[in-house]
Image (cartoon, grey):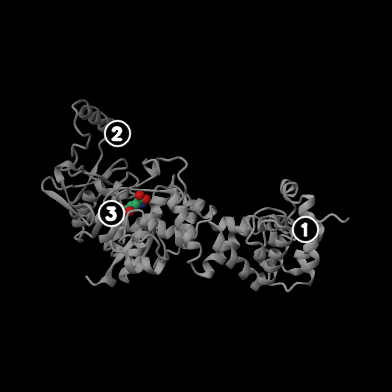
C-alpha cells in the first residue's frame, strides 16, 4: 500500500467532553495520516441517542479545530447512516450469516444466572441460531460467530493477539427496533470509508475479534490495528476514572498553547529519541507507529507546564496573538485597544517572560486598562516617603529624557548611584507607581510600552503633591 492510501479516523462518542486520552487518540490518527500524506476522517458515533449530546459534539469539534487537527471531507454522523446499517444487516440475514433471536429477557436472565452459578462466563447459548426464526416485533438479530478457529488480531503495538472464536458470543447486531448496535455500525462505517488503520484505546482490544469476524462476513479485509495503552494521571490512576479529569477546554483556559498541547499529547506514548520539544511540522515529519510505547504513560503536570513555557517563545506570532486575544477577552480586556505595533511589542515582551498565555493576559492589565487601579498593600510597602522623594526627582529627569529602553535604564542607574541604593529600590516603587502593582516586564520595557505620556501621568498621580 502506498503511504498516501493511508486512511485513519477518530470516532468519538459524544457522551462527554473531549478529554486528554481521546485527544491523544485523535492526534495519533491525525499525525499518522498527515505523516503519510493520507486522509484523516472524523466520525461522530452518536447512535446512543440518550447519552449523545450536541454540546459535546460541538466541544469535540471545536477543540480538534483549535488544536489544529483538521479532518478531510465532511464529518460523518453515525446516526445518519442508519439505513445503510439496516441494509447490511438484512444482507447478512439473507446470506445466513445472522439470525433472528426472540429469546425473551427472562430466559436470558435465567441463563446468565445459571452460568454465573456454574462459574462460567455468561454468554448467549445460541438457542435460536439454527431455528430459522422469522422476524417479529420483539426479535433482535444476532451475528453467527464462527464456532471454531482462531482470530488473530495483528496489532502494531501488541503484536499478534490470538482470540479463540469459541470464546466469542453470537453478538446482537440489530436491536428489536431494527437499529444497528455499536459493533455493526463501527465495522460498516470503517469499511465504507476505506479506513486502513484503526488507532484507538486498548479498551477496545476485546471488541476487535468480533469486528474482524463481521468484516470477514462482509468480504472485507481487516485494517491494521493499533491499540494504545491508556493514559494515567499523575498518581498512576486511570484518567477516565477521575471525576476532575481535565477536558481539553480546561487546558486552554489554563493558558496552554495548541502547539504545546499537541507536543504534550504526542509525547504521552510516543518518542523520537530523547527529543522533548516539537513543532507541529516536526511531529508530522517524525511521527510513526514504530515510535509508540507499549507501556501506559503517565501525565506529569510539571513537565506539561514546562513544555508550554518552552513553546511560548517558539510558536508562530499568529498562534500567540490568537490565544492572547482569547484570554484577554475572557478577562474583559480589549487587546485591540492598543495600536498594532504597541500590541505586537507587548506580546513580544510578554511571551518571553510569562509561563503561559493566561498569565500573559492577566499580567497585561496595567497596559490594557486606562486605569488599572492601585494595589494598596504594594503602595504601602513600596511608595515610602524615601522612595517617593527619589521618584519625584526621577520624574523631573524623565520628563526631559528620550523615551527608549537604554536612555531610561541609564537614568535609573544614575539615580541608584546618586542615592546609594540597589536597583530594586528604585525600579520597584516606579513599577508600583506606573502599573498599580508589583508584576510587570522589566521597568524599562514597562515604561516604553506605556509610552511617555501615560507613564508620566501615572507617575505624577502616584506622587502626592507637596
Ligand atoms: N466510539 C468509540 C469510543 O468513543 C470508539 C470506537 C472506535 O474507535 O472504534 O470509544
Q: Secondary structure at mark 1?
A: helix
Return the x and y of residue 264 as percentages of the image width and height: 41, 56
* Residues tagged 3 and 2 counted as in contact (Cβ below 8 A): no
Q: Earlier in the sequence, mark 3 or mark 2?
A: 2
Q: Is residue 62 visible?
A: no
Foreground disc of the pair 2, 1: 1
Does residue 56 show up? yes
Disc sitting over residue 20 in the figure: none
Residue 105: assigned label: 2
The residue where tag 3 is placed is: 293
Residue to which mark 1 is pinned: 390
Ligand 1 within 8 angstroms of badge 3 C-beta:
no
The alpha-carbon separation of the residues under discs 3 and 2 comes to 43 Å
Q: Looking at this view, is 295 or 274 the one in front?
A: 274
Camera-side residue of 377 and 58: 377
SS at mark 2? Answer: helix
Point out the residue furthest to the right here: 466
Residue at the (57%, 66%) spot, across then down: 321
User: Could you tell whether 414 is left or right of 53 in the image?
Assistant: right
Residue 114 sits in which quadrant? top left
Amino acid at each position: 500500500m502506498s503511504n498516501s492510501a493511508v486512511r485513519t479516523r477518530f470516532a468519538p462518542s459524544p457522551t462527554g467532553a473531549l478529554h486528554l486520552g481521546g485527544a491523544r487518540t485523535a492526534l495519533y490518527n491525525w499525525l499518522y495520516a498527515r505523516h503519510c500524506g493520507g486522509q484523516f476522517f472524523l466520525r461522530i458515533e452518536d447512535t446512543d441517542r440518550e447519552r449523545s449530546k450536541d454540546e459535546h459534539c460541538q466541544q469535540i469539534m471545536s477543540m480538534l479545530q483549535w488544536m489544529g487537527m483538521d479532518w478531510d471531507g465532511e464529518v460523518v454522523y453515525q446516526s445518519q447512516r442508519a439505513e445503510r446499517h439496516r441494509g447490511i444487516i438484512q444482507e447478512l440475514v439473507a446470506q445466513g450469516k445472522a439470525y433472528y433471536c426472540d429469546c425473551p429477557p427472562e430466559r436470558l436472565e435465567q441463563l446468565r444466572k445459571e452460568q454465573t452459578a456454574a462459574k462460567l462466563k455468561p454468554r448467549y447459548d445460541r438457542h435460536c441460531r439454527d431455528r430459522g426464526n422469522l422476524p417479529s416485533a420483539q426479535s433482535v438479530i444476532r451475528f453467527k460467530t464462527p464456532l471454531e478457529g482462531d482470530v488473530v488480531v495483528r496489532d502494531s503495538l501488541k503484536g499478534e493477539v490470538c482470540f479463540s472464536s469459541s470464546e466469542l458470543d453470537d453478538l446482537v447486531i440489530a436491536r428489536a427496533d431494527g437499529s444497528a448496535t455499536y459493533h455493526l455500525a463501527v465495522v460498516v462505517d470503517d469499511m465504507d470509508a476505506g479506513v486502513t488503520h484503526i488507532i484507538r484505546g486498548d479498551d477496545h482490544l476485546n471488541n476487535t475479534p468480533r469486528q474482524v469476524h463481521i468484516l470477514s462476513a462482509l468480504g472485507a479485509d481487516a485494517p491494521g490495528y493499533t491499540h494504545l495503552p491508556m493514559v494515567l494521571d499523575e498518581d498512576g490512576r486511570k484518567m477516565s476514572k477521575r471525576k476532575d479529569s481535565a477536558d481539553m477546554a480546561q487546558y486552554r483556559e489554563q493558558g496552554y498553547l495548541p502547539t504545546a498541547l499537541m507536543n504534550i499529547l504526542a509525547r504521552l506514548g510516543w518518542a523520537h529519541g530523547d527529543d522533548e520539544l516539537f513543532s507541529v511540522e516536526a511531529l508530522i515529519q517524525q511521527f510513526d507507529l514504530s515510535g509508540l510505547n507499549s507501556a501506559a504513560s503517565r501525565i506529569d503536570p510539571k513537565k506539561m507546564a514546562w513544555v508550554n513555557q518552552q513553546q511560548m517563545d517558539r510558536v508562530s506570532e499568529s498562534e500567540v496573538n490568537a490565544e492572547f486575544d482569547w484570554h484577554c477577552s475572557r478577562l474583559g480586556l480589549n487587546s485591540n485597544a492598543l495600536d498594532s505595533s504597541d500590541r505586537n511589542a507587548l506580546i513580544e515582551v510578554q511571551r518571553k517572560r510569562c509561563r503561559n498565555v493566561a498569565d500573559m493576559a492577566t499580567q497585561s492589565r496595567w497596559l490594557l486598562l486606562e486605569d488599572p487601579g492601585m494595589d494598596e498593600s504594594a503602595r504601602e510597602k513600596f511608595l515610602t516617603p524615601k522612595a517617593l522623594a527619589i521618584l519625584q526627582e526621577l520624574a523631573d529627569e524623565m520628563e526631559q529624557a528620550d523615551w527608549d529602553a537604554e536612555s531610561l535604564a541609564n537614568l535609573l542607574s544614575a539615580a541608584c548611584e546618586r542615592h546609594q541604593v540597589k536597583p530594586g529600590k528604585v525600579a520597584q516603587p516606579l513599577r508600583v507607581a506606573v502599573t498599580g502593582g508589583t508584576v510587570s516586564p522589566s521597568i524599562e520595557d514597562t515604561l516604553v510600552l506605556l509610552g511617555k505620556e501615560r507613564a508620566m501621568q501615572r507617575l505624577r498621580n502616584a506622587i502626592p503633591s507637596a
